[in-house]
Image (cartoon, rainbow, N blue to C red):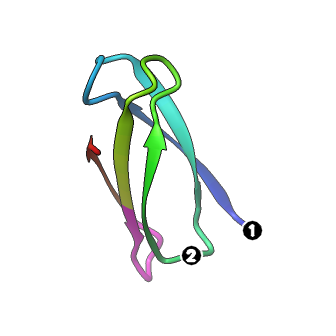
Amino acid sequence: MEQHEQFFNCPHCGQSISVLLDLSVPSQEYIEDCEICCRPIEIRYEVSADGEIVFEERRG
């Protein structure tokens, strides 16, 4: 399983946090709580055939 650590700012509190993406799954969408403010964040990502990662986060 290939993983990638993705850093981003929480859309609620603005703190820098990270999540581990499982790159063996070409696309995922899920909710994860911010480790700082505990509010839900909707996480989406897609991995293209050439390995480029398209990542989005927004308020869940």
Q: In the rendered structure, are the residues bearing label 2 and label 1 in contact, judged by CB atoms less than 8 Å apart?
A: no
Residue 37 coordinates in the image, percent (x, y): 42, 18
Q: For label 1, count other residues whose C-alpha is less than 10 Å away and answer few (under 14), some (14-19) or many (20+).
A: few
Secondary structure, mark 1, is: loop
Q: Quadrant of the N terminus?
A: bottom right
Q: Quadrant of residue 5?
A: top right
Residue 49 coordinates in the image, percent (x, y): 44, 83
Which residue position holds label 1?
1
Q: Which residues are magenta?
A: 45-53
Q: For label 2, count other residues whose C-alpha is less than 10 Å away and answer few (under 14), some (14-19) or many (20+).
A: few
Alpha-carbon span between mark 2 and mark 1: 9 Å
Instruction: Please tell me which residue is depicted at 41% across the width and 21% down the height of the picture.
Output: 16
Instruction: Please tell me which residue is depicted at 51% across the width and 34% down the height of the picture.
Output: 18
From the viewer's perspective, tell me whether residue 51 is left or right of residue 60. right
Residue 53 coordinates in the image, percent (x, y): 40, 62
Residue 11 coordinates in the image, percent (x, y): 25, 30
Q: Is residue 47 magenta?
A: yes
From the viewer's perspective, tell me whether residue 15 is left or right of residue 56. right
From the viewer's perspective, tell me whether residue 34 is left or right of residue 42. right
Q: Is residue 10 visible?
A: yes
Which residue position holds label 2?
25
